[in-house]
Amino acid sequence: MQFPLIQGNLSSIQRLEILDLYKGLMMDFTLEFEKPVSELENQIRVLKETSHSPNIDISHEIEALQSKVNRMLEDIYTKLTPWERTQLSRHPQRPHTIDYIDKIVTDFHEVHGDRRFSDDPSMITGFGFIDGRKVAVIGIEKGRKTQDKIKRNFGMANPEGYRKALRIMNLASQFQIPVVTFVDTPGAYPGIGAEERGQALAIAQNLEEMFNIKSPIVSIIIGEGGSGGALGIAIADKVFMMEYSIYSVISPESCASILWSDPKMAETAANSLQLSPNKALELKVIDGIIKEPAGGAHRHPELAIQKVKEVISQSLASLTSLDLDLMMQMRFEKFREMGNTTLVLDNSEEIKG
């Protein structure tokens, strides 16, 4: 959710009051399909406040409403359209890369710069420990507040970000330190400066060289996984998607702009692209789906983060037990086989690889 910049001759107190209002609006952010649930939850909050009054027992009413909320959550979230899933993957309260690092990685030391041009704040890289195992961590961060979003370039990495990520992966490879990546980006930054500094080449080099990293690589799509900007850090031995994340060759808005010259057709594009983890798993683009708490990761971030940690730990344990050459060969063959799956079109015709 974007808010206008605070302008005009306002006192410091007035500015703080407006910022607090913005913060409250962000915390109460509700998607259209979430509104029926939100209304019931507001009723439960009011009843709980009332229940503090003496001689009033409305616990049964609260339990009945909570049961209704639970049923409604299950009904809504098991029938999400691809466009609703896209909106959910972008929810402002979803855990970001920095949240996963804070909760999962201990003794994290961030590493900056690509040794060629500059540092890219949208790409976080460094070393730390997950369950006592030393790991290299790479993740794309979107930012939350306005200034942080600008600093992180809304999660769109520049070529120096991808070169920094590759520098860390090569360093990890020298010491056979496992690599964990968190993907959350609408795509690589398409600005003129980024293109002048070799955006396409930087991503292409990552795609090529990640096949030669002599360390286990686990990648988690935690929100949006858009285009080559996502794939540039997702050539991994194990790739997992969060239940309400998306992973696509192009964002719905960009797809709509190309096909219909109208970004407002994004919903149609999302539905046509069949953006869902189940479809990605069916096509063997990913290795598994990480189930989210009822209602999505933004409703219970701590639980969602814990589930991700468990999957990472289990994956690293199984990968580190493999012969290194075999693991790298399996990584190559996994991606080489992609695209050889039968696709069923709307008109029931088939395209076979």
Image (tube, rainbow, N blue to C red):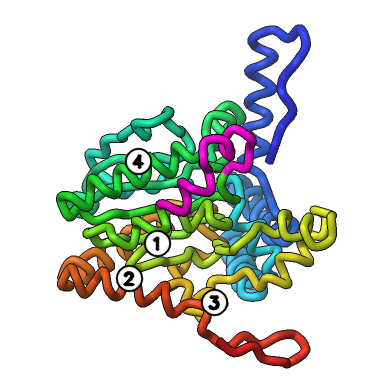
- Closest to the camera, between mark 3 and mark 1, is 1
Q: What range is drawn magenta here? A: 189-205
- Numbered badge on residue 278: 3
Q: Earlier in the sequence, mark 4 or mark 1?
A: 4
Question: Which amino acid, by three-letter code, is at mark 4?
Answer: Thr
Residue drawn at point x = 84 percent, y = 55 percent: 261
**Residue 290 percent location from the top left of the image:** 43, 68
Q: Are marks 4 and 1 in contact (CB under 8 Å)?
A: no
Q: Residue at x 42, y 72 (%)?
A: 335
The Cα–Cα distance between marks 3 and 1, rounded to whole angstroms, is 19 Å
Residue 36 visible in the picture = no
> Disc 4 designates what residue?
125
Looking at the image, residue 112 lies above or below residue 99: above
Q: CA distance from mark 2 to mark 1?
A: 8 Å
- Residue wearing tag 2: 331
Q: Are marks 2 and 3 in contact (CB under 8 Å)?
A: no
Give SS at disc 2: helix
Disc ID at residue 28: none
**Residue type indicated by callout 1:** Ile
The local secondary structure at tag 3 comes to helix
